[in-house]
Amino acid sequence: MDKHIDPLFKAKVEELLSQMTLEEKVGQLVLENAFAPINWHEVLQQQKLADERGEPFKIPLEINPVTSEHIRAGRVSAINSADPLLNNRLQQAAVEESRLHIPLLVGHDVIHGFRTVFPIPLAESCTWNPELLERASHAAAVEAACMGINWIFAPMVDIARDPRWGRVAEGAGEDPFLGAEMARARVRGFQSGNLPMGRRISACPKHYVGYGAAEAGRDYNSVELSERTLRDVYLPPFQAAFDNGAQSTMSAFNEISGIPGTCNSFLLRTVLRDEWGWNGVVVSDFNAIGELVQHGVAKDLRDAARLSILAGVDIDMESGAYTKHLAQLVEDGAVPLTILDEAVRRVLCLKFGLGLFENPYVDETLSEKYILAPEFRSLALDVARQSMVLLKNDKNVLPLQAQDQRIALIGPLANNRADLLGTWAVTGQASDVETVFDGFRHYVQGNLLNCVPGCSVSGDDPLDISAAVAAAQDSDIVVLVIGESAGMSGEAHSRAHLGLPGRQQELVNALAATGKPLVTVLMCGRPLVVPALVEKSAALLIGWHAGIRAGQAVADILFGAENPSGKLTVSWPRAEGQIPVYYAHKLTGRPAEGTGTTQYHEPFRSTYLDEPNAPLFSFGEGMSYSEYEYSNLQVLTPFVSPKETLQVGVVIKNTSSRAGVEIVQLYIRDLVASVTRPVKELKGFQRVHLEAGEKREIRFEIPVNTLGFHGLENRYLVETGEFKVWIGSDSTHGLDGIFTVRDILHS
Ligand code: GLC
């Protein structure tokens, strides 16, 4: 018996299990596609036309009659669908027309909103506002619940330190501490109560684990990680999600040091079940079980099914391996019945916990009340405003003066809708998106605003640069809105060159040559390598792919109605050659800033001949229209033990004439340890609102037992010795102090 089954449902689960045939047990471990095949090429063409006409578009889906039959036969446990009518029909097949009436899990990718599309998660993480993201996740859960969805394949909590990887867009950046905070907030938001009709939703933090460390930033590529790095960097956001009640997780496509995540019993059983005592459901990623054959660890689909169920994957997403082979594997004795029963128990427990036996259907009229509700649209604007990051503002060229400035609004993303939704916005509608041009028209009279695309985002189509240059020459200032299309970001969309796609740099150069000040807004799904653009821009705002309210948010910031507060959660490389570049790096034995070791004629250091080591913009960096001054850092507890709390105070003053929010960050460094430690590690942050001229002392209270790492035996510990602590505005600036940990803590 799986020792983790929730006692609340134990009797019901056992009673049901005792009635199930072997085929019905296998059926509870299958997620099957519920829809008849469609011609995606045709559908995407139709969607593009609808987007261009600014019309809503609905993907034409029909139920696959085979799936309905499988559901009635008790051979399907879960589907992936966002259509309430179809979901109710398929639930009816399961609940009223099958032998045991077991309801379906209805999963869907609700990554940054359902119909109210928020900024991409990487952008959302730049708010450094877990409370806001909890509310955004709750809004997404409400809309999803109205569709009959009871399982959200999110949050994506993969730590990512390589912007070549397209899925960096879906996570919370490079840092495990911040990633864990965001994971907690999103799980709370998705799984919170008070959904319509008392519905409940299970989150599914993914992709377990290490997916973001794909070699060369190429999606699905091999991952080589030490156990220590896995435990110190990639596992913490998952542990945080599970500690906050996440009821499922998704096994990753990638291998980790030779063993694919979808047949990795060390991760799926030793860590998840034995060490963490977690009893949720593990679902494979899409066909990840079948891909064990491509990985070369399974000789065929039967072998793949055996490896995955033994390793601890409960539900098979769409590979067909469990449907085709699991029953026979059990009958042949290759898979113990106890292993099968344990997986079925977890799935049944999840379904009971979601209340599906009592409440399987959704009220199909709910969507009228909740979809795109005004409070959700307003929340999406708040998130977009707080997610944007101001990285340059020479001579305070921003905020713009709306009244007396002729503005040339130029660029392929200035009047674009579909791309601003970003990746994984499959249930969003381009027609819901406010363009930057829409936003500007709230501030600027028509005769002072001229909007010209200048070129397309990618490709070599005929350029409209001359019209853009003419518009610039006939203006006082140029606002350039450029970057990536949504399709350049996300799954299976890695890039080896991270500059501006297409001929956008030509557009930039031509506009810069006019001598007009350039205010650049980058709408993108990842950090881009754009040193030349930064050089030519008087101001730079990272707008990201910011969802349905993107245009209003950009305008609110550029015209000063919103004082920007966003800070980067991912380092911004100067060159692809620096990647991976991240703030929490090791010092090495020959640090760049150190004396190095003199061999032959000069000191040899860990540097490049042709670039500095530092990224173009650092983790935690972001400007405001206010100025903040830090002073008087005090380590109030200079000697602490692991059971105590480190207390550090600092005074911060808003020296400007306007109120603002500063995200104050606390970093530490373990100066001498039994293994090498990063030069800095984020261990705390606070969003501090300060009125103009306001001065305030703020205090951090950090549990010392969170300052540890996995030592020589890969066990968590906090060692004794001196630590350095910084408090400041980003990972490269701050006041510092010293404290000492006196006793050792072993986990
Ligand atoms: C995809 C993604 C995963 C998603 C799943 C279902 O391949 O890797 O994040 O949840 O399939 O759509």
Image (tube, grey):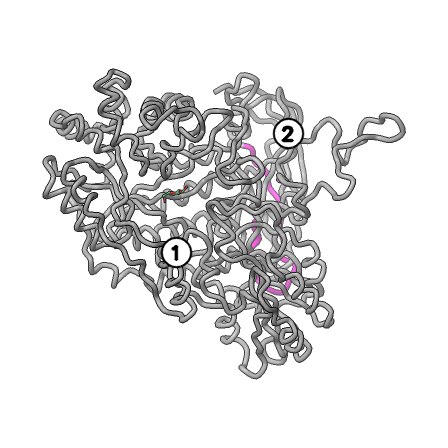
Give coordinates of residue 131: x percent, y percent. 43, 49
Q: Is residue 553 magenta?
A: no
- In this view of the protein, which residue sits in the foreground, 173 or 40? 40
Give coordinates of residue 96: x percent, y percent. 10, 43
**Mark toward the viewer: 1 or 2:** 1
* Residues rendered magenta in the picture: 646-663
Quadrant for the N terminus, please.
Answer: top left
Where does ligand 1 appear, by image quarter?
A: top left
- Residue 452 visible in the current orientation: yes
- Residue 691 visible in the current orientation: no
- Reading the chain from its start, which is encountered first: label 1 or label 2? 1
- Looking at the image, residue 671 sits to the left or right of residue 387; the answer is right
Badge 1 is on which residue?
41
- In this view of the protein, which residue sits in the foreground, 365 or 378? 365
Q: Is the residue indicated by label 1 positioned so its CB lies within 8 Å of ligand 1?
A: no
**Numbered circle sitting on residue 723:** 2
Secondary structure of the residue carrying numbered label 1: helix
For label 2, the crowd category at 10 Å Cα-Cα, with few meaning under 14, some 14 to 19 and many 20 or more, is some
Q: Amino acid at mark 1?
A: His
- In this view of the protein, which residue sits in the foreground, 217 or 537? 217
**Numbered circle sitting on residue 395:** none
Secondary structure of the residue carrying numbered label 2: strand
Q: CA distance from mark 1 to mark 2?
A: 57 Å
Write down the quadrant of residue 456 in the picture: bottom right
